[in-house]
Amino acid sequence: MEISRKIKSEVLVVGSGLSGIKASKELAAMNREILMVTKTKLASGSSFYPLKASLGTQVTKDNADKQVFLKDIEDLSCGMHREDLAEVYVDKIPDGVKEYEDIGVFPKKLEGERKACFANNARDIYLLSDWDQIRENVRTIFSAYDNLTLMQKTVVVSLIKRDERIVGAILLDDGNEFVLVECSAVILASGGFGNIYKHNLNPADVDGSGHILAIEAGAKLVNMEFIQFIPGITAPRYKTLFGEHTLMYCRDIVDDDGNSLLDPILPDSLSKKACLEIRSTHGPFTHSLESKYFDIAMMKNIIASNNEKGFTLIFADELYENKEEFYTVYLDWLKGKNVHLVENEVKIAPFAHASNGGVFINTFGRTGVNGLYAIGELSSNIEGANRLGGNSTGACMVFGKRAAIDCDRYLQSAPMQELTVNDGNLQLEQILKAHDGRGNEGELSANAIVDKVREIMWYKGNVVRSEQQLKQGIDEIQKCANMFSFTELVQNQHTRKLAFKAANTIQLAQMVLRAMLERRESRGAHYREDYPVENPEYRKRLFLTQNDRKTVSLDFWDQ
């Protein structure tokens, strides 16, 4: 196991979703040498995962709307958001939308103003669609830059620091060979971590590998317990995003025997109709609204029965009489997938979706580690305990550009430090050393480990959480770790990527469950059945730091 070759590039960009594309294009236009690596192909990740007909970007209307927009974000965040990041977003997003065309994206503005998911106020919404065409557009744009190199089917397995700054990285290329990269800066744009859950609405490459790279390099993670769970269709077409706005026309949600899930759980003060109407205004689950019973009822039934087939929605025929564009675009898209919400038996269940937390950054995407940036869903961005709809795509544009601008400035005083192949081999030895003594109690394949951890996460760290469940999950994942031989798998060239994926999945899942366990309250996307109310004492962010390759500390800070 050794380095096969070395590559030089001023900047390494990890990930090829909207944020990675934006940062790479900006830096390439500044004549910086860019190496972009992506686990799959160019234009990938959640940005290009066709969950539904379109993704939206919410845009500040005018100067008067800036404070209103900030108040929307603040009200929703439950005290967990960053004011400085939010201020930058609402100020810069009008320009960010205009720059979509620079990267081959041509958004369509919805007629009139509309309230985005969770928003108290309506504003302009721009829809992004036609992912295949966008991908071709990006390829054409990138091909014009000789200083931009793309490596597909490649993963970054370690970052190299020297004198407290980033100087390089180690990759596994499309042939599973180790490659040393000599660079002055790394921009992590590898997305969230929804794929560490069995049922998720993410592509397979959204697995949290960037979070592990960041925390091992010395960056901090924050708000990791605030994960969005969103209803997804399980039948007739599995893993399709459910349009929550259609619940305005839903009469009930029932089990296989036709029994209402809501009747036994709703308080006397909340009618079924009111619960469904509130639930129609937002996609992700939140403890902050009375509609929470809709998702809690589903998950409690799943945990009790181990039945993952989902629950049937009973719709009124009037649903298809609504000709508003926001409805017709979604319903027509479903028809193209042979799904009709009234004529078919449509079942849904909670799916893991977006990560509200991630790598702690400043307003330029800096992580606190010199030369290391984090942007997109990988970062803990403008959101808090809940995520305001229509902001995630826009944040990719705003902070992708800002990270590029700051990175260009940083490079002016950070010349590349020479790395030798031997330096890379020493880094590989440290990786192996960090895994010494693990996997001694048995053997499980990397795929078996990943599948087992994903199932544990879905049952123990989903919508409904408790101390007992979370501790069980942590113990069960540790048992998986004890049966996983990283060293053996990574020394085999054919199983190297799987070895790193399994190791990262184990480590990240343990951190997420520990964060959920530490926050002994319910707040936003985080619901503890044993602590069902929001506690003012926990109005602090929970940070995770790694002191060495084996020890992760969790601390509540006011930062």
Image (tube, rainbow, N blue to C red):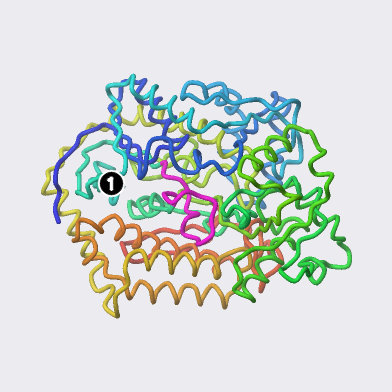
Q: Residue at position x 20%, y 59% from top?
A: 430
Relative to 61, residue 195 above or below: below
Q: At which x and y percent is residue 394?
A: 56, 33
Q: Nearer the viewer, residue 37 or 249?
A: 249
Q: Residue at position x 59%, y 57% from top?
A: 351
Q: Is residue 524 left or right of residue 290?
A: left
Q: At which x and y percent is residue 460?
A: 55, 70
Q: Quadrant of the N terminus?
A: bottom left
Farthest residue, direction bottom: 441
State the count of labels: 1
Q: At which x and y percent is residue 530?
A: 66, 74
The secondary structure that most of the magenta stretch takes on is: loop
Magenta-drawn stretch contains 203: yes
Q: Nearer the viewer, residue 227 or 402?
A: 227
Q: Residues within 10 Å of mark 1 (few under 14, many from 20)?
A: few
Say which amino acid is labelled 1: Glu
Magenta-drawn stretch contains 294: no
Q: Residue at position x 67%, y 28% from top?
A: 60
Dot 1 falls on a residue whose secondary structure is: loop
| Magenta stretch, residue numbers | 189-206
Relative to 491, residue 425 above or below: above
Q: Residue at position x 86%, y 56% from top?
A: 273
Q: Is residue 335 left or right of residue 264?
A: left
Q: At which x and y percent is residue 182?
A: 21, 38
Q: Is residue 538 left or right of residue 185?
A: right
Circle 1 sits on which residue?
164
